Image (tube, rainbow, N blue to C red):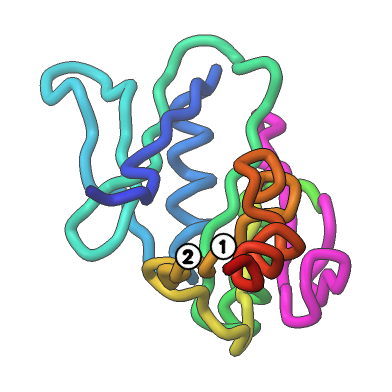
Amino acid sequence: MSHAVDHIQLSVEDYPRAKAFYAQALAPLGFTLMMEFPEQGPPSHGGFGAMGKPFLWITGGTRQTPTTHIAFGARSAEEVNAFYQAAMAAGGTDNGPPGTRALYHPKYYAAFVRDPEGHNIEAVWHGTVEAAPEKAPVRKAAARKKPAAKKAARGRTPAKRASAKKAP
């Protein structure tokens, strides 16, 4: 079973404007518009993704409130910078220029842009931070010693054992 998010959907008021923004802003990260629905008539649903899998869907309708924060993984600081420039050129507004966010961890390099609908869109590169193990290591149960109170309750205190050994 996978624990990754498979896809996410944003509601947007102006589908054509949102589609143009995401096509331009996500291009430096290698994402493209992969699907649109309906196939007949003007499209109102679009899926952006990479490697054959759309994972960000935008759906025309009403402006979503509250807005959403989505962070896209980048493969380098240069990709983060390129995302920021492309998103700003596509009509985004600055919500945090490219830079290190040591508050998160020492190698957290990110940029934040508000899309035309107000969603906080981030590109982040984690540098060479060591990845967590895929599966947590199994800890062996430590041998438990029974507390003296439990031994005393059963009448097996060290003093009674010693006196029992001395008795003829």
Is the residue marked by circle 1 packed among few (<14), some (14-19), or many (20+) residues within 10 Å? few
Residue, disc 1: 144
Q: Residue at x 53, y 69 (%)?
A: 142
What span is colored magenta in the figure?
A: 95-121
Q: Amino acid at mark 1?
A: Arg
Q: Amino acid at mark 2?
A: Ala
Relative to 163, does residue 113 appear above or below in the rendering? above
Name the residue furthest left: 40
Q: Is residue 133 visible?
A: yes
Q: Quadrant of residue 80?
A: bottom right
Relative to 79, does residue 89 appear above or below in the rendering? above
CB-based contact (under 8 Å), mark 2 and mark 1: yes
Asked whether, in this view, residue 69 is left or right of residue 74, the answer is right
Residue, disc 2: 141
Quick one: 64 or 102, which is closer to the camera? Answer: 102
Q: Residue at x 72, y 74 (%)?
A: 108
Image position, residue 153 (x, y; %): 68, 39
Q: Secondary structure at mark 2?
A: loop
Image position, residue 26 (x, y; %): 48, 59
- Quadrant containing the C terminus is bottom right
